[in-house]
Image (tube, rainbow, N blue to C red):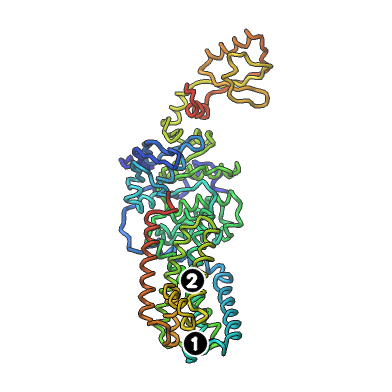
Amino acid sequence: MNPLVSPAPQANQTDVPLVVASPVKRHSSPLLGPGFQALFYKECLRFWKVAAQTVVAPVVTTLLYLLIFSHVLQGTAKVFDGRVSYGEFLVPGLIMMAVLQNAFANSSSSLIQSKMMRSLIFILLPPITSLEIFCAYVGGSMVRGLCVGFGVWLITLPFIPASVQHPLWVIAFAAGGSAIMGTLGLIAGIWSEKFDHLSLFQNFIIMPLTFLSGVFYSIHSLPAFWQSLSHFNPFFYMIDGFRFGFFGLSDVSPWLSLSVVMFFVVLLSAVAMRMLATGYKLRQ
Amino acid sequence: MISASTVAAVDLVDVSKSFPGVRALNHVSLRVEQGEFFALLGPNGAGKTTLISILAGLTRADSGTSKIMGFDTIADYRDARRNLGVVPQELVFDPFFTVRETLAIQAKYYGVTKADVWIDEILHHLDLTDKANANMRALSGGMKRRVLVGQALVHKPPVIVLDEPTAGVDVELRQNLWTFIKRLNREGSTIILTTHYIEEAEAMCTRVAMLKKGEVVALDTTANLLRGMAGITVQVSATALPPSWQARAETQASGAVGFTLSGYAELESMLAAFRDANIVIKEMKLGEADLEQAFLRLTSKEAA
């Protein structure tokens, strides 16, 4: 028998109280409390549930890029004065491109979806701080970016075994790059009011900057004008520094690249934190 | 039952909020004591949802203060939100997760660990045990509504706000939902609801606030409000209406015209008017005034 339709007085006598209605006591919380853990877990679970689309698909796409470009351009394109084959050169660039694009996609699509579905209210009602929301979304993006990057690296190994000379640099740039893109995705997701806005971001900022960042070529092969223009593209530093970790060779010093990455991490984090703290487009 | 306490469940003082072109709330003060079953009534656009959004921290008031169990909703927002459960009006859900995952994640947002037993209990009382592992997308509207109620209860909040909880929910389910909510109230939870179904407020709520254009136009116990509105309703089927009474006609259903009268004395003068105009009354039905009439009078200009 359904207890909800049973006579009320009986239910009252036999059942244990459902809710203890005393005020929840004030308690201090750590900087990143349970709200962060729960939201971070939710962000990871969200993409993992559709991993075929969020992890496997980008890995396969990137492998296709690698096979086609290296097949067509092997021998014709010369990089680092021929000290590295074109195929080898391409692998770190493609890994990093996959890391960056997927980190952006994770936070931005999660936010825009929960805004369109209006389910964002579920994280606006609980006592989660701005910092916790920030860290959870960016953290989730980093995990997805790094999963895809690792997947691309594994799947390209049988085709083009790329050596890793400085693993610490590889990890530093993968983490820094995915943090930047996760944060940018957070900003884009908060700012966008519909999917169209987000695709503006994707098609006119993310795609051009990644393709013109030296994923497919060394900027030394470019005419002087385009070469100097590339130095204004933050994506160039992320990819160049990441590539240094593989070969110990790069277009600019990895320390310069690391400084640029750190600068953008701080800058974008400050923007995103400000948006969250003021409730920009999230709370009226 | 809870003991008498000086801390109000909800305390709004002089709260105002404007949106571009609209004064949503105009110096609203409202105090709801612990353990009350309180209703917010008012037509669309009266400011009910804005008021709830300010309590929940979804909207920031332009001026005034709002507290939940003594915690300021801005300065002490974390403690205020731990004490509040909100069932939103819109039928929202996260399509990525199952019912159980939805509830478990929501519990974790509030720092509730080992919530499994409580979640099982919520599922049981909301008649969702069979659907625990179904994806949210696969649920009917009424089931999604029940999950929303469950999500508001995962952290056992002492104050529960329901914004139009039975909108679009079938009759049987509405009964079950109310039985459950009444029980939460009996066990000490403060319940605040907004509803369009005035009979629900009349049947269950101890006190009622009526909002109109962002202001509280009436605030009293349900019984007092009804007493103040003492009067009768009358449904008349006739071939025509006396000219002097045409303007008073309120509702029209199946050929009958409804009037609200101050008492039986007025009924006599109404019958006299029909007689004088030589109009034959075919059928007539009398009724006591209910909260709906009170509501209509207060929210329309011609206050009695």
Instruction: Give the mark nearer the N terminus: 2 vs 1.
Output: 1
Q: In the figure, residue B97 lies in which quadrant? A: bottom right
State the residue in front, B55 or A64.
Answer: A64
Mark 2 nearby-residue class (10 Å; few <14, some 14–19, many ≥20):
some
Which residue shows up at 56% across the image and 11% down it?
A: B269
Which residue shows up at 34% across the image and 42% down it?
A: B63
At label 1, the amino acid type is: Val
Q: Secondary structure at mark 1?
A: loop
State the residue in front, B186 or B11.
Answer: B11
Which residue shows up at 61% across the image and 21% down it?
A: B235
Estimate the x, y position of residue B17 in percent, counting from the top left.
Answer: 40, 41
Q: Chain of mark 2?
A: A
Where is A223 relative to B45, above or below? below
Q: Secondary structure at mark 2?
A: helix
- Judged from this view, the residue extending furthest toward the top is B276
Q: In the figure, residue B38 lies in which quadrant? A: top left
- Judged from this view, the residue extending furthest toward the bottom is A83
At label 2, the amino acid type is: Leu
Asked if residue A280 shows in the view, the reply is: yes
Labels 2 and 1 touching (C-beta < 8 A): no
State the residue in front, B157 or A177.
Answer: A177
Separation of residues labelled 2 and 1 (CA atoms): 20 Å
State the residue in front, A70 or A42.
Answer: A70
Estimate the x, y position of residue B140 in percent, counting from the top left.
Answer: 61, 52
In the image, which disc is placed on residue A79? 1
Estimate the x, y position of residue A214 in percent, counting from the top left.
Answer: 49, 78
Q: Chain of mark 1?
A: A
| Number of numbered markers | 2
In the image, which disc is placed on residue A209? 2
